[in-house]
Amino acid sequence: MKKAITSQNTLLTMFAALLFSLFAFNAQAKDYTTGWLTNPMHPPVQVRFMLTGQTDEAAKTVEGLLEVDLEGDWKTYWRSPGEGGVAPKIDWEMSNNISDLEWHWPMPKRYEFLGVETLGYKHKVVFPMTVTVDDFNKPVFLSGKLTMSSCTSICVLTDYEVVMDFIPNQLTPSTDAMHLYNQGMSNVPADSANVSIDQTSWNNDKQELSVLISNTQAWSKPDVFVDSSDIALENVSFSSPSITKDNQQLIATFKVSSWFGKPDLTNKTLNVTVTDADMAVEEQAVAATLPITTQIGSSIWQTIAFALIGGLILNIMPCVLPVLGMKLSSIIATDGMERRQIRTQFIASAAGILVSFWLLAGFLTALKVSGQALGWGIQFQSPYFIGAMIIITGAFAANMLGLFEISLSSNTNTWLATRGDNSHLGHFVQGMFATLLATPCSAPFLGTAVAYALGADIVTLFAIFTALAIGMAAPWLLIALFPQLASKLPKPGNWMNGVKTLFGLMMLATSLWLLSLMTSFVSTGTVVGFAVTSLILLLWRLGQVKGRKSVVITLAVILLGGASSLFIGSLTADKWSTPLPADHVWQPLKSEEISQAVAQGKTVFVDVTADWCITCKANKIGVMLQNPVYDKLDQDNIVLMRGDWTTPSDYVTGFLQSYGRFGVPFNIVYGPNAPEGIALPVILTSADVMGAIAEAEGKSTSNNKG
């Protein structure tokens, strides 16, 4: 009996061993792999292809992977290998029941050898792959030729035969393959809600691509890779980027090149891959030509300081000069007033400036949201705005000349008198008016502040324009804080009537200047007809109010002033007997011709201007039409190009914004030694222009002092 039990136990043990071996055989059968493949001509590299057993019957996909093992310093390449190398690929055309084989590319690293940068991998790398089949229920025969380039100081191109057959709906998961697959996928860039590609900007002249990227988390040590699946960009390489970043934004700028000439990325679809710390993100973006206007690397507080200074400087710019009479009258008229009244009047003027700047910020925000052109002073590109300003300045001029007064009813006067000073509204409008007249002028620090504001978010834009307003309102605020300063000024008297008349005439001259700007929108005959009619009405009203003698005197002043202006305008700043020379012959601005001229060894001077820009006129008369600049610009090797921003121009706007500028004047010099251009200050000097030209030509500035 005991022997029988022993025999039964032995049989059970043998049966269990047989079952175990069968299960083991089945477990091994789950692993679909080619095993390690080597090429005897290049033993440092071995590869193997595996299936994970993960399938998606609805999508008809099977997950797999290609594992590569590289010895020592051997490396292979990313899908875009950089300036050298060849990306690995599998030719699976001899396969059956396969429609696609998709690679998933882990984040590469940058490698440099003898000045050539490549993108790829060393040691071990796993490429996850997705196989798409035609019929999920039929056998698949995968027959592919893997071609892989591997390099150290030399490069070897090696082929491997990848052969495998399987039935998709009979695959079972493989633990080892799934582990490798997941390991590889963890290094593949993916979408992220935290990172977004906000803008791309392609500059064809500079062959330069810029990408603006936001991250809700703070950037640490980011890197950015760009490539494209577009066949037209197959041989294009992107340099290691220059990255400027702040807390949550970065701008990556790439030099773009190709062995087959100058590529054009305009409207091409790009892959933008970003890595930082433990994060890897990839998104597609289309290369646009609009410049990136966001300013990164500048402190918001520094920009606000620039805005305060720029706003303060606007008070002494010639654009605001016609309002000087109103300012002077406001200050002198405070004689005998209580400090509270003085303070409230000047606070009203400051409030007018502040509200006017807020209206400008709102106007620019509306343009920004709607995708329209942005810029300082662009309201002067509108005939409706100019027309309104002509009416306003004309009304102010007539009022200061005493041609009319607004009479209020006795009840209204009584109501105002019981509530203190009745001129607060007038002071408020005066502040708004001063701001509107200031916008044709550019000033130092102003351009930097405006550029930062227009490239920032709406809150920042309003903050910077508020700082501009406070800077411009500083003189008013100073007297509001210290009303006793008004007592130090001359006492009012009859002399004020003469001053008021003088500034009334200056305001009238401003109206005529604004009227001249209308020739860009309507015929010259129409403008002249309107001017003559308005002048006749003004003189008629002047005769009614002040008599015939005033008409004769005013007409004489207008004629004498006009003649004097023409005479003075025709003279140089320091040689009153020498008339100004004729302006140079300027070509229309064409940015594509700049690089062509520079390639021919020429120097290009670009002047972006507008008829309504006072600072532009000052630069022209005071610098560009004066020696030594005039003679220098007249030389044969100098190409002169002018961009006219008097009326809206998307082309000129794009050119300005490509250099982070949002207003005129803008002058820049290109040459063999400065193909990317040397931007000049807003207010020119002869030394600035001559120095930039000499630097662009590659000459010493000491040889060009005039």
Image: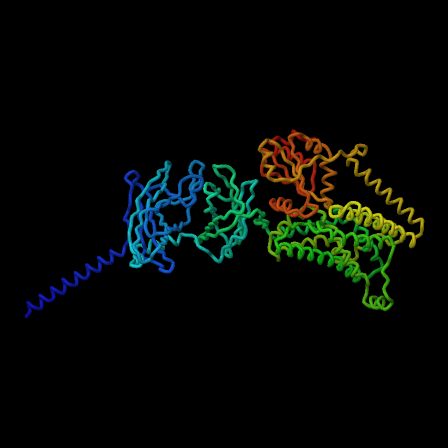
Please, is residue 648 above or below residue 590 in the view? Answer: below
Instruction: Name the residue: 28% across, 39% down.
Output: 40
Please identify the quarter of the rendering in which residue 586 is found: top right
Q: Residue furthest bottom?
A: 1
Question: Which coloring applies here?
Answer: rainbow
Viewer-closest of 668 and 472: 668
| Residue 552 location (% of width, % of height) | 92, 46
| Residue 461 location (% of width, % of height) | 63, 55
Tell me if 582 is positioned left or right of 246 in this view.
right
Tell me if 248 is positioned left or right of 555 in this view.
left
Please, is residue 342 above or below residue 580 in the view? Answer: below
Rendered-image quadrant of the C terminus: top right
Please, is residue 530 above or below residue 591 in the view? Answer: below
Rendered-image quadrant of the N terminus: bottom left
Tell me if 692 is positioned left or right of 544 in this view.
left
Viewer-closest of 333 and 509: 509
| Residue 56 location (% of width, % of height) | 36, 59
Q: Visible in this render: residue 663?
A: yes
Q: Visible in this render: residue 488?
A: no
Please identify the quarter of the rendering in which residue 18 is found: bottom left
Tell me if 140 is positioned left or right of 406 in this view.
left
Viewer-closest of 572 and 53: 53
| Residue 34 location (% of width, % of height) | 28, 49
Please identify the quarter of the rendering in which residue 279 is found: bottom left
Viewer-closest of 107 and 66: 66
Please tell me how many numbered marks the rendered image carries.
0
Q: Residue furthest right?
A: 548
